[in-house]
Image: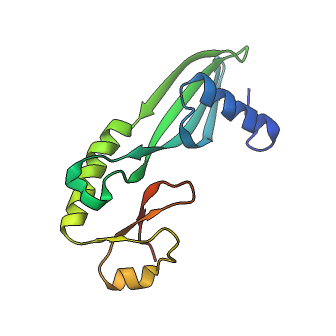
């Protein structure tokens, strides 16, 4: 039971996964691999969801949104019926580690707070020793972004 990785059937498959496996809030979901055996097919997916970091200790960064990733394995029998699945959702770990990491970066002065429509100059931020910037995105979420060159 191969899953076509393009076209309407693929999107329908992803929407069925979102709706039936409690992943309606994921912002990214994709098939990454498939394995075929005599007993059926295993489909491997990855997903990401927005996670909000909370706490007064974060100061101006309180309420910032970060991405948390996870994986999903779907096992189908030879008839194409779902026989089992496993979800590895890192949201809880991501919140703890993300908050601790952000606190360290804030203490080191390595986070820049941009205005919502500001065109962020990543070269300048790198020169200033900033590793991250916080900016409200088009959806109105206060998003933590890494400064990459």
Q: Residue at x 49, y 42 (%)?
A: 49
Query: Viewed as shown, does residue 140 lie left or right of 82?
Result: left
Which image quarter: residue 37?
A: top right
Location of the N terminus (image quadrant): top right
Q: Nearer the viewer, residue 50 or 113?
A: 113
Query: Is 125 placed left or right of 104 in the picture?
Result: right
- Whether 116 is drawn above or below 99: the answer is below
Using the image, determine if residue 19 lies above or below residue 103.
Answer: above
For image coordinates 32% across by 44% down, the residue present is 95
Above or below, comparing residue 96 to residue 3 in the picture: below
Q: Quick check: 113 left or right of 96?
A: right
Give the image location of residue 34, x and y in percent: 63, 35
Between 80 and 69, the one nearer to me in the picture: 69
Residue 77 occupies quadrant: top right
Q: Residue at point 27% right, 50% down?
A: 99
Determine which quarter of the picture holds residue 16. top right
From this viewpoint, is residue 13 visible? Answer: yes
* Residue 42 appears anywhere in the view: no
Q: Position of residue 32 (x, y in %)?
A: 60, 42
User: Could you say where residue 144 lies in the image, as x and y percent from the top left?
Assistant: 40, 60
The colour scheme applied to this rendered structure is rainbow
At x 68% / y 15%, what residue is drawn? 81
Residue closer to the observer: 126 or 70: 126
């Amino acid at each position: 039971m191969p899953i076509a990785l393009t076209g309407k059937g693929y999107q329908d498959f992803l929407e069925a996964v979102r709706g039936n496996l409690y992943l309606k809030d994921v912002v990214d979901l994709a098939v990454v691999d498939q394995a075929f055996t005599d007993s059926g097919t295993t489909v491997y997916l990855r997903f990401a969801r927005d996670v909000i970091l909370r706490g007064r200790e974060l100061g101006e960064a309180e309420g910032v949104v970060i991405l948390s990733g996870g994986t999903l394995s779907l096992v189908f029998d030879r008839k194409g019926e779902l026989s089992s699945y496993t979800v590895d959702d890192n949201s809880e770990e991501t919140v703890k580690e993300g908050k601790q990491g952000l606190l360290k970066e804030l203490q080191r002065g390595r986070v820049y707070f941009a205005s919502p429509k500001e065109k962020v100059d990543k070269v300048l931020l790198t020169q200033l020793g900033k590793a991250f910037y916080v900016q409200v995105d088009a959806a109105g979420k206060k998003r933590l972004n890494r400064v990459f060159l």
